[in-house]
């Protein structure tokens, strides 16, 4: 019974059409007085080509993809249009596509839709369908994407974005359909015509996908308004989005002395100041806008990039103050784009070296030949970026493969795009290398390419470019130092919470050192922290006779030191060094035989000294028997 | 069931035929017996975001039993997100796709139960419907004894209900003891041009002791008489005060579930609800 009801409904609609066709007939006689030249023939392909209709194949498409078919037709009509989409790799062409256009223009302004019946040899989507390709200027091109066809006939409606524009139209219909999962398919279209459906409604239109976009630009910048859509309510209660050409919109600039916009949506920034591009569509405001802030000087970072916190042992750095960098061939390859105008300056921000790129379309960085980087044990790519004006930034990584040279069929690469970077502040990107899915090798990393939009206008400050490995050691101790077990009676303590230290000892005498000394509690236990060690002395509160002791005991912790020596000193001064093993894995405890310091007067030790680099935490220093 | 429906279609065709011949079998409009005098109205004047007048409207909250008896998918609330004035003299009921207390949609259902119940007259609303597969807006009435007698003994007068997948077509129906659910007396009306979601239309019934006339704008598209009810072995229970209900249901037996092509949120915009009595003075 449901079906019968439905049928009833369809009959009512059809009788409506019949009535309206008659009315159109009346209207035509009126309108023909004003607009005599062009026929308003609604038919495109009913059972054959309509009057003056031609067909042209798109470049690269299979020439025979479109055929007139007499076997599969809608409602047993004599002929339908058949489209055979090729399989992947078909030598005749990679897709099916072409345009149907008339040699005599038609006045289609009395219709609001192109309609036809469609079926497929399987249920599938059939790519792009549209109208307005006339093989000339294609001014009023409009298309819909991913229309579904089924194995039975269904009616398809392509709303005309704005019928008023189509008073002199030659582009009746076009299609472009490629293989899906490398496989072709066939679909049929029939009874193709223009209609005026009272149940089809225009809802809204937008530019920039309805977003209010803002952009800092330099004078001279040129770009296009994109994200053009119009939405129409179909008789089945669903909404259909159409992509109209810019010519359906009327664009305007709020300040012509700053930015000017052409009917094709091309914007040129001609002066300094602020201007907003908006559009109307069918006499209504379209959603979305594009505001430019044009300035000769877009500003620069006030603060240097954040200091990286990764442990140096798990970092492979190309450019950072915080680490030792590997050799880089160049930070701006000759093939960077646009050639001749892209520039690189080495600047300092708050004393921190930073790379500044200007006029960026694509900036190449290379580590080739002997400088190839083996990042196979690395997990992340880091980069700090600051831009006043880029809306899109892409990062491409290229590995040269086993031949260690460009090309040769073994290069792999991938690129990741960022569309949401904050402008005017540092963005610290830490990208898992696994996200670069196309980058199949990482042991001969050769190129790092920064690109983005607005192309050729981008300004980009770059710092802290490095790879890092997962699970690197922490950069400071999380656990308290070991608690000594030697009885106090057998100990002379210099620094320890467990013992009474030699009274009056100066832990930070001014010997001209750069080391920053602090007492830092770790889990409630005070430690002696040497940050940025070069050397550091300790003056004992009283001279000590340690000749009766067996060992000098030190508990210490470091993640980044590559040198750490301890000295005992007797007056003279006479000193002797002992190299401590570094870096540590957690807290290290050493018992250095006192005999290692035999050149010193062990009965009269009055100072100690540490030399080396990095950040070091010391838990206990004492002599024991 | 099939036979009954087929019979009903036959009836419909006959009525069409009779209309076509312009015979006087169709009764004159009730209004010709007097004039309509306004007895109750809500024009929905008020500040944006306010709930409608609590002297006029109460709410059904939650999911009801078995989706309000129809496997409906929404959770009804009285949050301003789902029901509020728009500040321009309209009430807006909004169906939202969101996770809420186990439901995937929220919406609202407002009613005049125990606040305003009335017998006979003209009951009308001017409104724009929502649209889209799975949307089921309605303007309807239940008998005042509903909470005691239950359904369908209370009687149900559906002034307007619409399937969102057919935005140019509404139905008017009558349910009661012996003729309810799939057996209700019903008739649909399709606009000759346009849709119910894009412009305001007036939906009304005119009701007296003998019959109920169904209107869209000025078009009377259905008349149901005591005789029609008797002819389907039903009982005429429409001699008591009824209360009004307005709602948007999502999904349910009548429309099926929303599809991935259904646009949310969806709104029903109500300009006014008015009730008139027939004055014969």
Image (cartoon, rainbow, N blue to C red):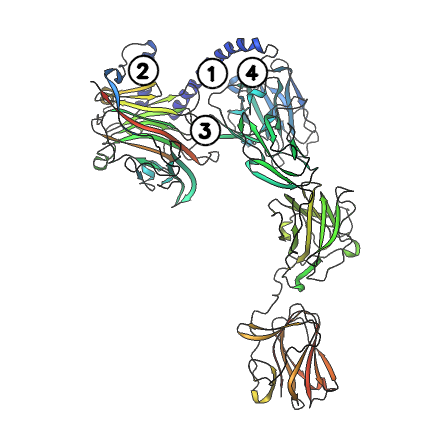
- Look at the image and tell me whether residue B251 can be seen: no
Q: Are dots 4 and 2 on a single chain?
A: no
Q: Which residue is mark 4?
A: A42
Task: Give me the disc on residue B15.
Answer: 2
Q: Secondary structure at mark 4?
A: loop
Q: CA distance from mark 4 to mark 2?
A: 36 Å
Measured along the vertical axis of the image, is residue A427 above or below residue A534? Answer: above
How far across and how far down the image is residue A579, in percent? 71, 77
Q: CA distance from mark 2 to mark 3?
A: 29 Å
Residue nearest the observer in this picture, A9 or A37: A37
Say whether residue A156 is left or right of residue B127.
Answer: right
Q: CA distance from mark 1 to mark 4?
A: 13 Å
Q: Secondary structure at mark 3?
A: loop
Q: Which residue is mark 1?
A: A17
Measured along the vertical axis of the image, is residue A574 above or below residue A345? Answer: below
Residue nearest the observer in this picture, A253 or B37: A253
> In which quarter of the view is residue A594 placed?
bottom right
Q: Determine crowd level at label 1: few under 14, some 14-19, many 20+ residues with C-alpha closer than 10 A.
A: some
Say whether residue A231 is left or right of residue A89.
Answer: left
Q: Secondary structure at mark 2?
A: helix
Q: Are dots 3 and 1 on a single chain?
A: yes
Parent chain of label 4: A
Q: Which residue is mark 3?
A: A237
Q: CA distance from mark 3 to mark 1?
A: 19 Å
Q: Secondary structure at mark 1?
A: helix
> In which quarter of the view is residue B22 placed?
top left
Q: CA distance from mark 4 to mark 3?
A: 25 Å
Q: Determine crowd level at label 4: few under 14, some 14-19, many 20+ residues with C-alpha closer than 10 A.
A: some
Q: Are dots 4 and 3 on a single chain?
A: yes
Number of numbered markers: 4
């Amino acid at each position: 019974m449901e079906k019968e009801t439905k049928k009833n409904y369809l009959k009512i609609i059809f009788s409506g059409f019949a009535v309206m066709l008659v009315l159109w007939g009346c209207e035509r006689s009126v309108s023909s007085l004003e607009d005599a030249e062009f026929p308003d023939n609604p038919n495109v392909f009913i059972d054959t080509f309509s009057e003056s209709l031609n067909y042209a194949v798109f470049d690269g498409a299979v020439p025979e993809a479109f055929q007139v078919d007499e076997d599969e037709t809608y409602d047993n009509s004599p002929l339908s249009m058949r489209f055979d989409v090729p399989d992947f790799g078909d030598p005749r062409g990679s897709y099916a596509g072409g345009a149907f256009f008339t040699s005599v223009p038609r006045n289609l302004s009395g219709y609001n839709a192109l309609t036809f019946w469609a079926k497929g040899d399987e249920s599938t989507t059939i790519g792009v369908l549209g109208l307005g390709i006339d093989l000339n200027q294609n001014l009023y091109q409009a298309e819909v994407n991913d229309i579904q066809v089924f194995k039975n006939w269904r009616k398809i409606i392509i709303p005309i974005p704005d019928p008023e524009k189509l008073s002199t139209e030659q582009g009746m219909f076009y299609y472009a359909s490629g293989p899906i999962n490398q496989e072709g398919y066939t679909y049929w279209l029939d009874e193709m015509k223009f209609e005026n459906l009272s149940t089809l409604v225009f809802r809204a239109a937008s530019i920039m996908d309805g977003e209010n976009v803002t952009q800092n630009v330099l004078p001279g910048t040129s770009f296009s308004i994109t994200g053009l859509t119009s939405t129409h309510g179909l008789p089945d209660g669903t909404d259909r989005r159409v992509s109209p050409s810019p010519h359906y919109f009327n664009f305007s600039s709020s300040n012509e002395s700053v930015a000017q916009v052409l009917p094709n949506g091309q914007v040129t920034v001609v002066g300094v100041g602020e201007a907003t591009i908006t559009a109307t569509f069918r006499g209504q405001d379209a959603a979305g806008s594009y505001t430019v802030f044009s300035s000769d000087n877009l500003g620069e970072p006030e603060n240097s990039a954040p200091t990286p916190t990764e442990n140096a042992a798990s970092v492979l750095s190309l450019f950072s103050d915080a680490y030792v960098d590997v050799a880089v061939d160049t930070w701006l390859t000759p093939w960077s784009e646009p050639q001749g105008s892209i520039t690189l300056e080495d600047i300092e921000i708050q004393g921190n070296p930073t790379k500044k790129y200007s006029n960026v379309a694509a900036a190449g960085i290379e580590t080739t030949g002997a400088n190839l980087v083996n990042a196979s044990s690395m997990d992340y790519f880091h980069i700090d970026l600051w831009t006043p004006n880029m809306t899109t930034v892409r990062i491409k990584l290229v590995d040269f493969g086993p031949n260690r040279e460009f090309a040769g069929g073994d290069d792999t690469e991938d690129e990741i795009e960022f569309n949401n970077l904050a402008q005017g502040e540092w963005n610290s990107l830490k990208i898992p290398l696994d996200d670069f899915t196309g980058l199949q090798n990482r042991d001969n990393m050769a190129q790092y390419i920064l690109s983005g939009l607005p192309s050729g206008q981008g300004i980009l400050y770059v710092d802290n470019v490095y790879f890092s490995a997962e699970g690197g050691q922490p950069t400071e101790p999380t656990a308290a130092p070991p608690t000594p077990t030697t009885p106090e009676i057998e100990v002379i303590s210099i620094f320890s919470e467990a013992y009474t230290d030699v009274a009056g000892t100066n832990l930070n005498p001014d010997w001209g050192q750069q080391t920053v000394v602090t007492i830092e509690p770790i889990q409630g236990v005070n430690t002696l922290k040497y940050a940025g060690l070069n050397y550091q002395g300790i003056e004992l509160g009283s001279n000590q006779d340690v000749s009766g002791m067996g060992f000098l005991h030190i508990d210490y912790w470091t993640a980044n030191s590559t040198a750490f020596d301890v000295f005992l000193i007797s007056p003279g001064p006479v000193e002797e060094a002992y190299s401590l093993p570094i870096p540590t894995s957690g807290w290290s405890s050493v018992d250095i035989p006192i005999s290692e310091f035999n050149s010193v007067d062990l009965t009269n030790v009055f100072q100690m000294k540490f030399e080396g680099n990095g950040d070091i935490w010391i838990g206990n220093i004492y002599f024991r028997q | 069931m099939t036979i009954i429906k087929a019979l009903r279609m036959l009836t419909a065709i006959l009525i069409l035929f009779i209309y076509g011949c312009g015979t006087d079998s169709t009764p004159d409009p009730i209004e010709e017996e007097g004039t309509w005098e306004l007895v109750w109205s809500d024009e929905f004047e008020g500040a944006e975001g306010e709930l409608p007048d609590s002297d006029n409207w109460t709410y059904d909250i939650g999911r009801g039993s078995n989706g309000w008896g129809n496997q409906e998918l929404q959770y009804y609330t009285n949050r301003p997100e789902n029901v509020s004035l728009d500040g321009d003299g309209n009430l807006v009921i909004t169906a939202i796709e969101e996770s809420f207390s186990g439901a995937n949609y929220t919406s609202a259902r407002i009613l005049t139960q125990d606040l305003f119940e009335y017998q006979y007259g003209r009951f009308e609303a001017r409104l724009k419907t929502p649209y889209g597969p799975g949307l089921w807006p309605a303007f309807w009435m239940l008998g005042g004894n509903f909470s005691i007698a239950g359904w369908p003994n209370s009687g149900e007068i559906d002034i307007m209900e619409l399937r969102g997948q057919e935005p140019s077509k509404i139905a008017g129906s009558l349910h009661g003891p012996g003729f309810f659910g799939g057996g209700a007396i019903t008739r649909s009306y399709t606009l000759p041009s346009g849709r119910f979601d894009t412009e305001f239309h007036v939906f009304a019934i005119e009701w007296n002791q003998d019959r109920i006339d169904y209107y869209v704008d000025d078009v009377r598209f259905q008349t149901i008489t005591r005789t029609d009810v008797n002819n389907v072995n039903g009982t005429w229970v429409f001699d008591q005060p009824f209360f009004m209900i307005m709602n948007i249901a999502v999904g349910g037996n009548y429309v099926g579930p929303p599809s991935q092509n259904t646009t949310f949120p969806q709104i029903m915009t109500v300009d006014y609800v008015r009730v008139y009595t027939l004055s014969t003075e």
